[in-house]
Structure formats: C-alpha cells, structure tokens
Image (cartoon, helix red, strand yellow):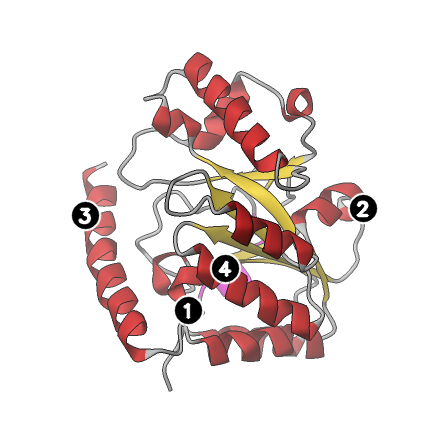
Amino acid sequence: MRDFTIQQYIALCRAIIDSGYQVITIHNYCKYFKETNDVFLILRHDVDKMPEMALKMAQIENRLGISSTYYFRKTPEVFNPKVIGMVADLGHEVGYHYEVLDKASGDHCKAIKIFNSELDDFRRICSVDTICMHGNPTSKWLNRDIWLFYTLFDYKLIGEAYLSLDFNRIHYISDTGRSWNSEARVKDYVSGTSNSAFKSIKKTPNLIKILNKKIIRQVCINVHPQRWSDEMSPWIRELIGQNIKNIGKICLKAIR
C-alpha cells in the first residue's frame, strides 16, 4: 500500500478521532491548554508550496469535524489570498510561516521590518494570532532566532509553534523528509524530552497504531500538504524529489 496518499491521510484523521483525542489548534493550545493535563492532539500544517493541496486537506478535515492550524509562507507560489481565506472560512486557524532572517541575510533589523509588513498582509485576509518559522535547510540562519531580539507580544501574537509549546509534555512528530522519522531533518526539530515514543515510526500505518493504543496523552503532528496525493504522477514526483533532497540534507548535516 502506498503511503502519503490522501486516503492514508483520511485514515490518519479517523484514527485520531476514534482514539478520543481532542483535536486543537496552536491558538487554542496557547489560550486554553498550556497548563492542563488533558488528552489532546495539535494538528499543524506547514504550507511550503502548493496551497491548493492545503485547501483540499482543509476541506477533508472540515468534513470530518476537525479544526487544525495552517501556516502559509509569504512567497509568490504560496501566498494566495483566495485560498488562505477559504481555509480560514472552513474553521481552521491560519498563521504566518515566516522566513525573515533568511530573506534579510541574517540582519535582524531588516528582518523585523519584513516580518511586520508580511504579517500585515496576512491580517488583511484573516485573523493571525500565532506564527511558525520556516526552516530552509540550505540557509545558515534559524528564523526563530529573530525572537532573541524582539517579543511576540509587540506584534499582538500569542504563540510560535516551535517556541510556545511544552515539548517536555507534548510528543512531536513531523512528515519532514517524507518520512515520519527522517534522518534528513535539519531544522524541523524541537527541544524537549517527550519524543521517544515516536522514534521507531516510519510509515503512517505505524503512527495510526500508536495513536490507537491511546498511551500518549498530548501530541503535535506536523503535516505538509504537498507531500500527500492519490494521483500517481504527483506522488512519484514528490517521492523522487524528496529522496534527492534528503540525500543532500544528510550530506549537509555531515558537513556542518
């Protein structure tokens, strides 16, 4: 059976629901769940490209009664106000997937001006309360380091997806590298002690089995919509393209 198909994603969503997790957004976590021991699952999407796939995924979740968080980049390929507005109208949280230190070549004064301008562009479409850095593996800058110089509060933000979650309690897993446990992960990592439960997972059915056991109380799953397709041609393109990228990222990690 092929992994990273829309049908596999629907199976994952149904497993989340059937396992009794309360599915919440990053916004809801920051507002209401930070201090609780409740059973919940944060479903987050980094929209790095192909916003139309994000809309398709958002529509599926809406039909299943799930509200999740979508972080869109401010790039010509991804910043589609119509799609972003439609995702928000489906009841999902929309946030800003910022990469301003990369755009400013590490100059934090220039970077925060870009940040403020791009955040305003998103807020002309819908409410934005949380953000998430984009991690370019070839860049020497880590975009979340902008918050070493500034504060979220100054921009009327309540959370950042890497910085505001307690990963000593929340188990984090991501499909970065088109694998649930890719060795090619360069910047999609979190600081915390609670992530050992997912170390052996490679395929989506394995993740579903873990969720069905209901032994992990708090989970955050990061899904990139462009990785998932039922159609053979885009599925193969993503498979081949990501495998090539993974080799490059592994080599880059070894060099660094």
Contact check, label 4 and label 1, Cβ < 8 Å: no
Question: CA gap, disc 4 to disc 1?
Answer: 10 Å
Q: Which residue is mark 1?
A: 228
Label 1 sits on a secondary structure element that is loop
Label 3: state its secondary structure.
helix
Camera-side mark, 4 or 2: 4
Name the residue carrying label 2.
32
Quadrant assignment for the C terminus: top left
**What's the amino acid at mark 2?**
Tyr
**Label 3 Cα neighbours within 10 Å, binned few <14 / some 14-19 / many ≥20:** few
Mark closest to the chain's N terminus, 4 or 2 = 2
Task: Indicate the amino acid at tag 3.
Answer: Cys
Q: Residues within 10 Å of mark 4 (few under 14, many from 20)?
A: many
Q: CA distance from mark 2 to mark 3?
A: 41 Å
| Disc 3 from disc 1: Cα separation | 25 Å
Image quadrant in which you'd find residue 58: bottom right
Residue 184 locus on image (x, y percent) = 30, 53
**In the image, residue 11 above or below residue 39:** below
Say what amino acid the circle numbered 1 marks: Trp
Tag nearer the camera, 4 or 3: 4
In the image, is residue 32 above or below residue 12?
above
In percent of the image, x 68 and y 55: which residue is there? 89
Q: Nearer the viewer, mark 4 or mark 1?
A: 4
- The residue segment tinted magenta is 193-199
Q: Earlier in the sequence, mark 2 or mark 3?
A: 2
The residues bearing labels 2 and 1 have C-alpha atoms spaced at a distance of 31 Å
